[in-house]
Image: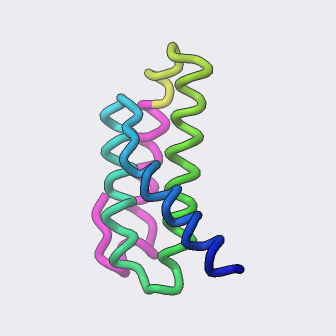
Amino acid sequence: MFRVAVVVLGVAITSEAIAQTGIPACDSWLAKWDDCIDKLPEILQDDFATINGKQRQDLLDHIRRDPKAKPGLAQFCKLMNDSSRKAKSFQEYGCRF
């Protein structure tokens, strides 16, 4: 049963990964996360894919609730990209932000 849940979750994340926020800074940051996941050890990939899917969904939900928030979200994504670039865990596995 657990495996079925993981497969279903994986499908949801994959379909959500296609969704764009319409904010270039956010779409770029999320795409870099997508690229990074395959570079991580297999044991971490599902967790990081889940995190990235959640981040994407949170941004999309926020935009739906308040479309005027896009400039603030763009700034947030730029800051998150900078933080990701500095994260040792990402650097160790060759992720580029």
Q: x, y percentage for residue 82?
A: 39, 51
**66 above or below 95?**
above
Q: x, y percentage for residue 1?
A: 71, 80
Q: x, y percentage for residue 90?
A: 40, 71
**4 above or below 96?**
below
Question: Would you identify the image quadrant in which residue 96 lies?
Answer: bottom left
Residue pictured at 35% horizontal, 41% vertical: 27
Residue 38 part of the magenta segment: no
Depth check, front residue: 83 or 31: 31
Depth check, front residue: 56 or 14: 14
Residue pictured at 31% horizontal, 45% vertical: 28
- Which region shows up in magenta? 74-97
Q: Specify whether 62 is left or right of 29.
A: right
Depth check, front residue: 51 or 15: 15
Q: x, y percentage for residue 43?
A: 52, 86
Q: Residue furthest right?
A: 1
Question: Would you identify the image quadrant in which residue 36 lies?
Answer: bottom left
